Amino acid sequence: MREKIESNPEWFIAFKDAPPWNNTKCTHGKCSDLFHSQFQTPEYRSGSVQSGSCDAPCDCGPNIPCGWYLFNHSHPDCRAWLVSEFMMGRTAMGDPNVHGVFIDDVWEAHGPELEGPGSGAAAHDTGMSPEDIQVMMVDWRKTMDAANKAVIDAGGYTWRLFYNNWTCAQAPFKKHECTEYMAEVCSPEAPMEKNALFYGFSGMTGCGGPNSRIEVPPLAASSLSVTSNPPSHDPIIDKLQHLASFLLIRGPYAWIGWAWLGCGNFPYRPKELDVDYGTPLETCHPVKGSPGVFAREYTKSSIRVDCNKWEASITPKEEEEEEKK
């Protein structure tokens, strides 16, 4: 990005010529006439989940202040680069380990969807008229359509193709909804097996507002520090219950992990994700004679969730054989 900011400034939206501006042009002695917000950048040291921090002024290049810049989607060369290189290059879909991309934020009638102090004044700072914004909205959609098509043509997924595609996506059901939800999905129709399921963990998310899908106990939430290093303890809330629920309902295309964490969090990976549980032998189903209990057999393990007690078990087949003996 720093290379393109310097080599192709026309690919970005500039500040208007004359003040006042709500966002600053200069940070730590570096200035840019290209619009940028300081929110959610490495040197924005608020200590919140939404922002990262550096011990010293962050280095985004010898002449470039760190910040949140705006692409000029009306420039065709910018669109071509965003799709062919930014989305499909070696650091994204061009890497065989990347199955898809999260594309976030939109252009709206009031301007770009930005967050944080001063960001709502992007249209003011750039001098864009309502007519200018309408043009940018149309051109932004052209970029989005081209990007989505390129990813899908490559056999990948974009965020909007996931089931449970919230920014703060955690579990697709709340704890108290377990029985009702499982009764619906653990059925012969098995609706989740026909979807590209995104099942997010709870406990370290960058979201704490009304869109969060699982309640996070205040003590658990406050004990988590925002850091660029791995957490010192397992931050996942109800890990076994949600891992088992994921294994119960998933189909051939499903992912479990973290949704948006904020710029300062290190994505913690539990050891349970590196276990081979086998492949499903059946569809998830209610356990006969045990209302609120659901099960599914895999080739290497037996999965069970008791929604009444909010308990779960993932039992390796070797252990089951030993118990029978």
Image (spheres, grey):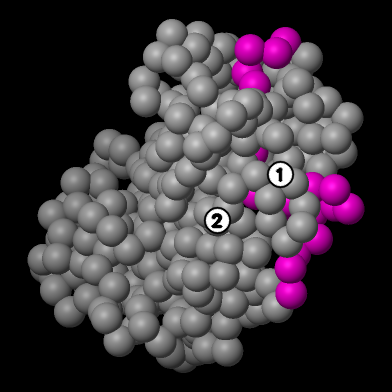
Labels in figure, total:
2
The picture places residue 266, in percent across and down from the top left corner, at 61, 70
Classify 10 Å Cα crowding around label 2: few (below 14), some (14-19), many (20 and above).
many
The kind of secondary structure element at disc 2 is: loop
The picture places residue 105, in percent across and down from the top left corner, at 48, 36
Magenta stretch in the rendered image: 56-76
Q: Amino acid at mark 2?
A: Gln
Does residue 212 lie above or below 71 as drawn?
below
The residue lying at 48 percent from left, 61 percent from top is 50
Q: Is residue 71 left or right of residue 88?
A: left
Q: Is residue 150 left or right of residue 164?
A: right
Residue 260 visible in the current orientation: yes
Does residue 55 lie above or below 267 as drawn?
below
The picture places residue 236, in percent across and down from the top left corner, at 44, 76
209 vs 30, nearest the viewer: 30
The residue lying at 28 percent from left, 52 percent from top is 211
In the rendered image, residue 70 lying in the magenta stretch gets the answer: yes
The residue lying at 45 percent from left, 15 percent from top is 129
Q: Is residue 149 left or right of residue 169?
A: right
